[in-house]
Amino acid sequence: MIEILKSKRGSDAAKFNGVYVHSSVDPIKEAEAWARSYYNHLVGVPNVIVFGCGLGYHIKALADAFPNQKILTIERVYEFSTLAQNILNSYSNVEVLNMELSDILSNEHIRRAVSQLYMYVEIPSLVKIDKAYYDELKTMLSGRTSKSLDFIVECRKDHKNFFVRRPHIYKNSIITIKSINDNSMKPENTYTRQEIIWKTLGELVK
Amino acid sequence: MKILVINLLRIGDIIMLSPTINSLKKKYPHASISLLINRECEAVAPLIKNVDRFHYFERQKIQTSLGEVDRSLFEGYDRLERAVVELDNENYDQIYNVTQNKLSGWLTGLIKSKEKFGLIIDQAAKPSFGSKWLQYLNDFEGENEVEPIHYADAFQMAFSLPRSDSIELNSSAAKVKKEKQILLQISTSDSKKNWNLQSWLNTISTFNRFNMGYKFLVLSSPLESKQHTDFVVLCKNSNLDVELFECNFTEALEKLESSSLLITLDTSIKHLASSTNIPILEISLGASDVRKTGVYRDHAVSVQSKLNCSPCVHSKPCSQSSHLCAQSIPPDLVALLANCLIKKDFMSIKILAEEYEEFVQINRSFKNENGLWTSLPCSKNQILETVPKIIDRLSWLSIIEPEAKKFKAIFIAQLGLILETVRAFGEETKLDFISQLSDYEMTCSRAYGRLIVLLGDLRQLTKQSHFDGLKPLQNKVENLVEQLQLDSRTFTLSKHLSSIYQEPLMDTKFKLEKTKNVLDLCLSRLQTEQRIIQVLTTNIGGEM
């Protein structure tokens, strides 16, 4: 299923089921351009979760740009996750995961990542290989459905009290800042710090 | 000492804040001052004086993460929490919130500091302003009946700071020779504030008919470049000497120093120009209100529509079927005003103001070291309409300014400005002025009498053990409110009274107590107004 070929620039390129997943001309340049498009968004984000890995060019470009940030990459194809190690082995801030969804969600690295500021980004050509898998993963990491909110809150013990006291939030099919603030903020004597942060965020979407 | 100033508005507002920052530096010369602004305003940071450190609020990143379903719900939460923790770690001694909105109020409440000034929303969701000035800004500045206070003045007064009456920016420009060029800022990000491009073109064309050798430069940021290039091409096709000047703020500032005139809409460029001595003509459209955010400098001229909806509310779409306020500004008038400003011919501006007074209001700005920045109409009739509003504003200030010495300085400066302006119109105007003051005096006396009667009723009522008379008293208050509202000169008194009985949760005794306080306040304001009228009448009357 996987074919490794030489690109025009001489570095390795790859095909999956006959379709190129890296540029056939210059995969390194392609990966750097992809990473550059995220620079502004990822500055100061300590945990970056990348969907797809391939031969690892994209992850290398990201790790070079953000040496102090933890990069977790989830690769559905086992062979790619092994091949990528060739160029990612020397990066201590990079973890490549190849697992079923249930294992991903119980993975210690993932749980630690989602317990603080994190963002997820995707490599389109690799996500296409198993779109359903990555879509479900994305949903689980979004915190915007009941199931995924439960998962995130479980990883963030300090938020448990806030959400347990507001079960109606879970009734929304898609949980947004509006559904949190509209329904859950009852007049009480004082608001906690968490409640004030959610309220402040509410002002940004008005 | 470490001070944090919070301004989460736009670039123009940050430039307008510079006198407040300079005042803070005057008051605390050894303090380290930090400024928290939106990341989108980063470009203006190098120009702001006396700021040791900038913090950036990632507003757009947070907003985007909150608004997109496939982004983590917690991203915005985490970003905001990190920003607060970062600011907490700075251990600020004082925080000044100069953004009058809920977002900044909550944020100021969240950040740790020994002292906080400005709008704060506390853990009980209760807002506090910490200053009667800011309470006044919040409660009354939106009302058209009230003559507003310029924001640059209001914040300095609110925080009891020593006075800085001009915008001073970091500028590398040395004294440069003026060139025969006119700068144009032809668009803003708010479509309601924009003027038709054909009107701009007609203005240039008319101006060129009676002036030779002026070059027009269209100021443009890289983002505006495409739209502005199209305009320049349009001008060139009409044989007009117009060029595009794509620049950053520092380059724009240098160009302003060397040019003969700026014609601008309500944009950050206008505030940037306030720090230079270039003559400025502002076309004030949509929600732009020169009285609150005008060019904070002497002798800037603005032109705005006389439509009832002008200035409109910033957050609402235009209420008219077409952009009438923009259509009511004739390009010929703008060209004539530009010509007058280049020649510093303010007498001709007065004549134009009277000729066009049915459609537009032309204002000129006046700053005063001890008083308040004020924008006054150039036409006689419009001045006569504005004077009662300034008297009304002074009566407010007598209540909100805690320092008698400061109020006295403002009082003397504002009265001096009114007298000087009226005198400049000649003897005939003095008569009209005295007559109008006399009408106003009668209105005040009538209102005073009614308030005294009401206060008497209230005193009787509070002596009773049961408050059976509350309903009749409420009726009397409502009746009085209606009467006060009939006359624009007592309208703002009614604002004090009208809210009291609409508060369902307030208990009867508290309602009565509050009514008494409000009545006392209204009486005090009326006394101040009568005193001002007397001073003005005596001064002008004595000269006739």
Image (tube, rainbow, N blue to C red):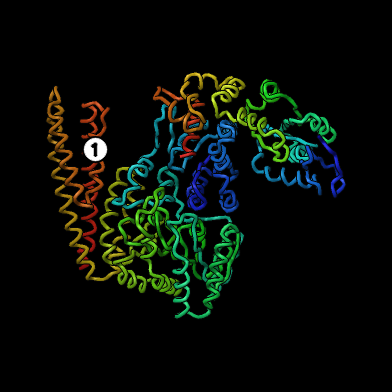
- Which quadrant would the N terminus of chain B be assigned to in this image? top right
Give the percent coordinates (x, y) of residue A88. 81, 34
Q: Quadrant of residue A83?
A: top right
Query: In the image, residue A154 lies at what x, y percent?
Result: 60, 20
Question: Is residue B88 visible in the rendered structure shown here?
Answer: no
Q: In this orientation, does residue B353 appear? A: yes
Tell me: residue B106, above or below residue B139: above
Q: Nearer the viewer, residue A136 or B137?
A: A136
Q: Secondary structure at mark 1?
A: helix
B63 displayed left or right of B438: right
- Residue at 31% of width from left, 66% of height from top? B359
Q: Quadrant of the C terminus of chain B?
A: bottom left
- Could you say which quadrant of the image residue B426 lies in? bottom left
Residue A68 picture location, percent across and down? 73, 34
Q: Is residue B475 left or right of residue B40?
A: left
Q: Residue at x 46, y 69 (%)?
A: B198
Q: Is residue B51 above or below residue B281?
A: above
Q: Is residue A174 above or below residue B21?
A: above
Residue B431 appears left or right of A76: left
* Crowd band around label 1 with a 10 angstrom C-alpha radius: few (<14), some (14–19), many (20+): some
Residue toward you, B443 or B500 = B500
Q: Which residue is mark 1?
A: B518
Frontmost residue, B160 versus A113 = A113
Residue type at mark 1 is: Val
